[in-house]
Image: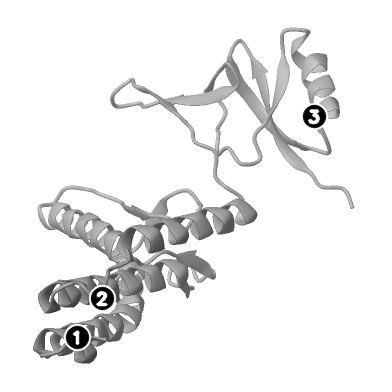
């Protein structure tokens, strides 16, 4: 099976064009036919570059129109890389949030604090490992991380967006599917997204809070565990 890739046509340190090709050798040959020996191809299947972007030492940069700053375009990981990154992040969370404790020698209060922290970390890990699969944006099925951090970030962005609109200032709300570029979202899509993650996270948070209250009310280590 032939796997096609995206290649940027680089000439004068600038992306002149972007085409699909079977391999680098063919892509580079085509570029040199157009721009001469100083032109070359750069594989950009995972780099969301555009015509006019700058190429320096094999890295692609974009000049921000408003600030004039040069920003490097970071490659978007493929599905296999995303799964690998998620696995590594989850393992890190488990080691960081679930430290061991000497149950025999610790005090009751220390055990309570540890067990409460454990219940919170399990919620974090669960949300990390179970993203929301939804068609809330554009009617297309997408995968969205709905950890507390991501929910807070989205809520802050959407609140700021609504405040600007209410003040008569034009603004476009943007968000992204996991591993993809940000796109414009409608208010209806944002509300649907919030509603769907609430349906998942609200009962989970309520369950964790019940566990925490039970732990706090315990009068022995056996009850805590």
Residue at the spot x=52%, y=53% of the render? 85
Q: Nearer the viewer, mark 3 or mark 2?
A: 2
Report crowding for label 2: few under 14, some 14 to 19, many 20 or more residues within 10 A (C-alpha). few
Q: Determine the CA span between mark 3 and mark 2.
A: 59 Å
Q: Determine the CA span between mark 1 and mark 2.
A: 8 Å
Horizontal side of 185 relative to 177 (left or right) equals: left
Q: Determine the CA span between mark 1 and mark 3.
A: 64 Å
Outermost residue to the right: 1
Report crowding for label 1: few under 14, some 14 to 19, many 20 or more residues within 10 A (C-alpha). some
Does residue 122 appear in the picture of this structure?
A: yes
Chain-order first, disc 3 or disc 2? 3
For residue 221, the mark is 1
The residue to which callout 3 is attached is 24
Does residue 177 appear in the picture of this structure?
A: no
The quarter of the picture where the C terminus appears is bottom left
Q: Nearer the viewer, residue 116 or 207?
A: 116
The vertical placement of 31 against 4, above or below, is above
Q: Nearer the viewer, residue 190 or 207?
A: 207
Q: Nearer the viewer, residue 34 or 208?
A: 208
The residue to which callout 2 is attached is 103
> Whole-percent x and y of residue 70?
39, 22
The quarter of the picture where residue 121 lies is: bottom left
Q: Helix, strand or loop at disc 2? A: loop
> Whole-percent x and y of residue 63?
41, 23
> Whole-percent x and y of residue 214?
16, 90
Outermost residue to the front: 105
Residues under numbered marks 1 and 2 in contact, where contact means CB atoms less than 8 Å apart: yes
Residue at the spot x=20%, y=92% of the render? 223
Residue at the spot x=39%, y=68% of the render? 125
Q: Helix, strand or loop at disc 1? A: helix
Chain-order first, disc 1 or disc 2? 2
Chain-order first, disc 1 or disc 3? 3
């Amino acid at each position: 099976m032939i796997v096609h890739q995206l290649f940027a046509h680089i000439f004068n340190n600038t992306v002149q064009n972007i085409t699909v090709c079977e391999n680098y050798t063919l892509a580079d040959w085509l570029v040199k036919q157009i721009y001469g020996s100083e032109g070359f191809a750069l594989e950009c299947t995972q780099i969301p570059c555009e015509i006019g972007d700058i190429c320096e030492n094999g890295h692609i940069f974009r000049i921000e129109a408003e600030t004039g700053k040069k920003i490097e375009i970071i490659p978007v990981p493929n599905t296999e890389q995303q799964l690998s990154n998620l696995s590594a992040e989850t393992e890190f969370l488990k080691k960081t949030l679930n430290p061991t404790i000497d149950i025999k020698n610790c005090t009751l209060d220390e055990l309570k604090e540890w067990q409460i922290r454990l219940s919170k970390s399990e919620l974090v890990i669960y949300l990390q490992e179970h993203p929301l699969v939804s068609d809330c944006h554009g009617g297309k099925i997408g995968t969205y991380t709905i950890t507390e951090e991501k929910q807070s970030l989205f809520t802050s962005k959407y609140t700021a967006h609504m405040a600007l609109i209410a003040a008569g200032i034009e603004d476009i709300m943007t968000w992204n599917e996991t591993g993809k570029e940000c796109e414009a979202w409608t208010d209806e899509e944002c509300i649907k997204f919030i509603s769907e993650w609430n349906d998942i996270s609200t009962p989970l948070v309520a369950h964790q809070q019940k566990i925490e209250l039970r732990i706090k009310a315990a009068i022995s280590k056996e009850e805590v565990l």
